[in-house]
Amino acid sequence: MKNRFEFFGIKAPERRAIQRPLLLKNNLPVKGEAFYLIRELWEEPQRELHYLAMELLVKYQKQFDKRDIQILEYLITHKSWWDTVDFLAANPVGFYMKKFPAERDRLIEKWLNSGNLWLQRTRLLYQLKYKSELDVEKLDEIVNRLKGTKEFFINKAIGWILREYSKTDPEWVIDYVKKIPLHPLTRREALKVINRR
């Protein structure tokens, strides 16, 4: 974590055990109160509270409306680092994009043009859990817009989404890596699972 954040020092299994009662359906506040609490938790310095905020947010995914992209963008762009951004991208953002596909196209443009590394990484990773539902045309469009960068977190994310998709369609990933000029780090990441077979 490069000493970027304060920690209480609570290990993940213990933290999950502590917060489990708070996340039970019967203990959850109404959505508006929850989103206020999520912002309040995000303002605290300790990283464990940020993790709690994200896991609380996931409990409200089914209640998302279009305007809730605002809280997602806020969490992605504040106190940003790979640990929170990757969770947000693969979970609530991935859910939001499926629920509001028309917003997806608008956000691809907005986030890719933002110059914000973490919004761009989110654009790459929102399909991480989609498996056979992954839109390869959208992935190709985003990769082609971002490839050629020297930014580690972008090159790693391109490789990671390709590696994850290789578990679903290894032939597509092999062909893609052959035809697209990719950073060596990206190429290694993309073929990790395939090369272990």
Image: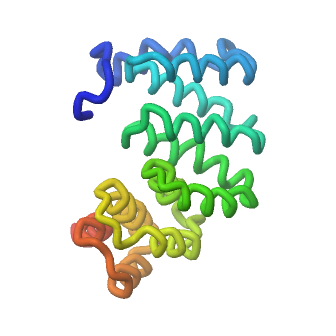
Q: Residue at x 37, y 82 (%)?
A: 180
Q: Is residue 42 above or below residue 136?
A: above
Q: Residue at x 67, y 17 (%)?
A: 28
Left or right? Give the position of 181 relative to 79: left
Q: Is residue 6 visible?
A: yes
Q: Is residue 39 above or below residue 85?
A: above
In the rendered image, residue 157, in percent from the top left (x then y), is placed at: 38, 58
Q: Nearer the viewer, residue 196 or 144?
A: 144
In the rendered image, residue 20, in percent from the top left (x then y), is placed at: 50, 17
In the rendered image, residue 107, in percent from the top left (x then y), is placed at: 64, 56
- The quadrant in which the C terminus is found is bottom left
Q: Nearer the viewer, residue 174 or 114?
A: 114
Give the image quarter of residue 5: top left
The colour scheme used to paint the residues is rainbow
Q: Residue at x 42, y 37 (%)?
A: 80
In the rendered image, residue 172, in percent from the top left (x then y), is placed at: 44, 80
Left or right? Give the position of 106 relative to 18: right
- The quadrant in which the N terminus is found is top left
Q: Residue at x 46, y 16 (%)?
A: 44
Q: Is residue 197 visible?
A: no
Q: How many marks?
A: 0
